[in-house]
Image (spheres, helix red, strand yellow):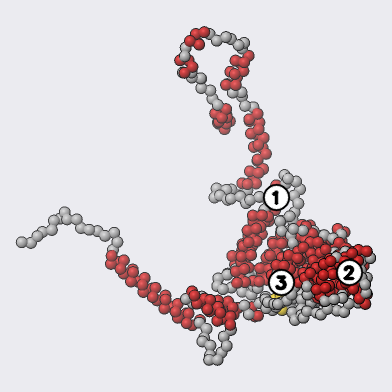
């Protein structure tokens, strides 16, 4: 007999259609396999060809391939392409303040005066004996007794500082020069400083206006160079800065500014530290009446020597900001480089530069991003603009209550930040394009710094319910509202609790009745006090009445 299915049997229902899920899984597998085949085809078409037999593979390629092989070789080609981009054709323009093929000079023959007693302590004997004589302090006593050194010996000691092989001898000879202020004031001329620069390998010593040639060179162009003589000379110039003639100090500062154009000062920590100390010591010795003219001459010199912003930015990055003079000079240089006008350096930047001028400068082709944009130059130009803006002190508010001037200043800051954000948005840094990535990160950093540090106050958050001009109207109505609240609280009626307390104080004190002492329940169950409206409730009620009226 056939069995009939009950109409009440429960038929299972799946939450998902298993056939549809299986179909989707097969489709995903096919798409993934197709994608892998396409990637493999692209990888084979872009892979470098196998070197021919007998071809020489650079050592850096093989070394980097071995390094990356630990990661199954997935990034080997990326690293090798990065190395190939680091060749001379991909280097930025660089200025070399020192000779690239410089050979250390030999010591010169001492003058006849140095061969006689008591100066023979500096010349006779081997190097160890001369060092012992210097460390003993006898030559310092001789200099003190004779109030200095003869001119030939003084010049010979300066020459020995440039060629001495021993650190001890170099240091003691510098200390010997320091205790001769009269010879420093009379003999340390710009010509003498030029001869010292040549002695330690400076290429161009004439501080004259005119274009200086730059080239693309390797990063390690000074590899193996001994910078101990340069460090010793910089330390000596720092110690004798106050005794130098004024013209020598001006020439020295210009020389240091041009030296800072060489990237060597930035990448060498020891030179950078000594450079900052020397620069701060010398720049504060310039008289105030000579300051504006010196700044103009220095800015005009550097502006005419170099046209590339990548080279100019090196000097600005080397200048110390802890010194007010150096900070002021850095900002004047930045304004000169930004507007290509050395006449702006005659006065303080806050007197000649405004934020609207800087915003207009951003509209020039130099700051427009396009196919022909040099992003290394754009990055340097944005950094120079940031130094020109500085802390934003480009206008002086008339008074603390001048809210209109403050609002206008903040509006200019917001417009400047918006222009920078537009440059950031237009910069496409996808792919292995390091110059684009660096430029975009610098633009973003400057934009955020301007927004959060140059504004006089934090930017107010906007709401969808805000009305145009609402903030200005609120600031205008704020004094009237404050006066209204002061008068409102000043006319407040006295509290009933306070009035009852004053009445009890006025009444004569009465003795408590004996019946009150006999009832202990009065202490355990105090009588409930009449409810009295508190001060806050009165304020609320009064405000309701005022609003209703």
> Residues under labels 3 and 2: Cα distance?
28 Å
Q: Which numbered disc, 3 or 2, marks the residue that appears first in the sequence? A: 2
Given the current orientation, which residue lies at the most extreme bottom position? 54
Does residue 65 appear anywhere in the picture?
yes
Q: Which residue is mark 3?
A: 263
> In the image, residue 347 lies at what x, y percent?
81, 60
Q: Which residue is mark 1?
A: 406
Q: How far is the residue under mark 2 from the one under mark 1?
A: 51 Å
Tell which tag, 2 or 1, sits nearer the viewer.
Answer: 2
Quadrant where the C terminus sits is top right
The residue at 59%/18% (across/down) is 501
Q: Earlier in the sequence, mark 1 or mark 3?
A: 3
Q: Residue at x 56, y 30 (%)?
A: 536
Q: Give coordinates of residue 240: x percent, y percent.
A: 85, 64
Q: Is residue 175 above or below residue 499?
A: below
| Residue sitting at x 68%, y 71% | 377
Q: Earlier in the sequence, mark 2 or mark 1?
A: 2
On the rendered structure, is 207 left or right of 532?
right
Which mark is in front, 3 or 2?
Answer: 2
Quadrant (top left/top right/bottom left/bottom right) for the N terminus? bottom left
Q: Nearer the viewer, residue 458 or 135?
A: 135
| Residue 197 in view | no
Q: Residue furthest left?
A: 1
Taking depth in this image into account, of 479 and 237 the one nearest to the observer is: 237
| Circle 1 Cα neighbour tier, 10 Å, few/some/many (<14 / 14–19 / ≥20) | many
Q: Nearer the viewer, residue 227 or 135?
A: 135
- Compared to residue 402, the image places residue 265 above or below, namely below
Tell me residue 272's x, y (percent): 73, 67
Which label is found at residue 257? none
Q: Position of residue 327 (x, y in %)?
A: 76, 60
Instruction: Give the SS element for disc 3.
Output: loop
| Label 2 sits on residue | 188
């Amino acid at each position: 007999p056939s069995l009939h299915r009950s109409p009440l049997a429960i038929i299972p229902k799946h939450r998902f259609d298993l056939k549809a899920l299986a179909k989707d899984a097969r489709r995903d597998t096919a798409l993934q396999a197709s994608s892998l085949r396409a990637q493999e085809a692209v990888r084979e078409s872009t892979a470098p060809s196998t070197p021919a037999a007998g071809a020489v593979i650079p050592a850096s390629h093989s070394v980097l391939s071995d390094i990356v092989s630990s990661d199954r070789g997935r990034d080997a080609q990326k690293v090798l392409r990065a190395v190939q981009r680091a060749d001379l054709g991909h280097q930025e323009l660089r200025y070399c303040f020192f000779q690239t093929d410089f050979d250390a000079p030999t010591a010169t023959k001492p003058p006849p005066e140095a061969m006689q007693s008591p100066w023979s302590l500096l010349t006779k004997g081997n190097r160890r004996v001369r060092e012992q004589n210097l460390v003993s302090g006898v030559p310092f006593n001789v200099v003190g007794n004779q109030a200095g050194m003869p001119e030939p010996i003084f010049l010979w000691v300066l020459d020995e500082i440039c060629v001495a092989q021993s650190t001890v001898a170099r240091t003691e000879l510098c200390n010997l020069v320091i205790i001769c202020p009269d010879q420093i004031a009379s003999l340390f001329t710009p010509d003498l400083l030029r001869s010292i620069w040549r002695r330690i390998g400076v290429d161009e010593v004439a501080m004259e206006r005119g274009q200086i040639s730059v080239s693309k060179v390797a990063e390690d162009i000074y590899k193996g160079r001994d910078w101990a003589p340069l460090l010793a000379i910089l330390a000596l110039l720092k110690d004798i800065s106050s005794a130098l003639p004024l013209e020598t100090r001006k020439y020295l500062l210009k020389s240091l500014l041009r030296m800072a154009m060489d990237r060597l000062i930035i990448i060498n920590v020891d030179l950078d530290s000594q450079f900052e100390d020397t620069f701060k010591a010398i720049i504060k010795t310039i008289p105030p009446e000579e300051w504006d003219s010196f700044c103009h001459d220095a800015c005009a010199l550097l502006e005419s020597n170099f046209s590339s912003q990548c080279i100019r930015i090196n000097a600005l990055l080397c200048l110390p900001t802890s010194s007010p003079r150096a900070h002021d000079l850095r900002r004047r240089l930045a304004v000169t480089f930004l507007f290509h006008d050395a006449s702006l350096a005659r006065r303080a930047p806050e007197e000649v530069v405004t934020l609207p001028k800087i915003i207009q400068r951003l509209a020039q082709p130099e700051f427009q991003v396009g196919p022909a944009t040099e992003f290394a130059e754009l990055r340097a130009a944005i950094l120079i603009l940031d130094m020109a803006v500085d802390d934003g002190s480009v206008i002086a508010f008339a008074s603390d209550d001048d809210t209109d001037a403050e609002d206008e200043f903040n509006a200019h800051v917001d417009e400047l930040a918006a222009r920078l954000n537009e440059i950031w948005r237009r910069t496409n840094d996808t792919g292995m394009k390091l110059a684009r990535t660096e430029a975009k990160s610098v633009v973003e950093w400057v934009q955020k710094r301007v927004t959060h540090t140059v504004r006089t106050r934090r930017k107010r958050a906007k709401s969808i319910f805000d009305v145009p001009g609402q903030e200005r109207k609120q600031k205008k109505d704020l004094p009237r509202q404050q006066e209204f609240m002061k008068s409102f609280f000043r006319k407040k009626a006295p509290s009933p609790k306070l009035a009852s307390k004053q009445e009890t104080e006025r009444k004569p004190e009465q003795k408590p009745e004996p019946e009150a002492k006999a009832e202990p329940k009065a202490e355990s169950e105090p009588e409930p006090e009449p409810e009295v409206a508190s001060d806050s409730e009165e304020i609320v009620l009064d405000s309701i009445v005022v609003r209703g009226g």
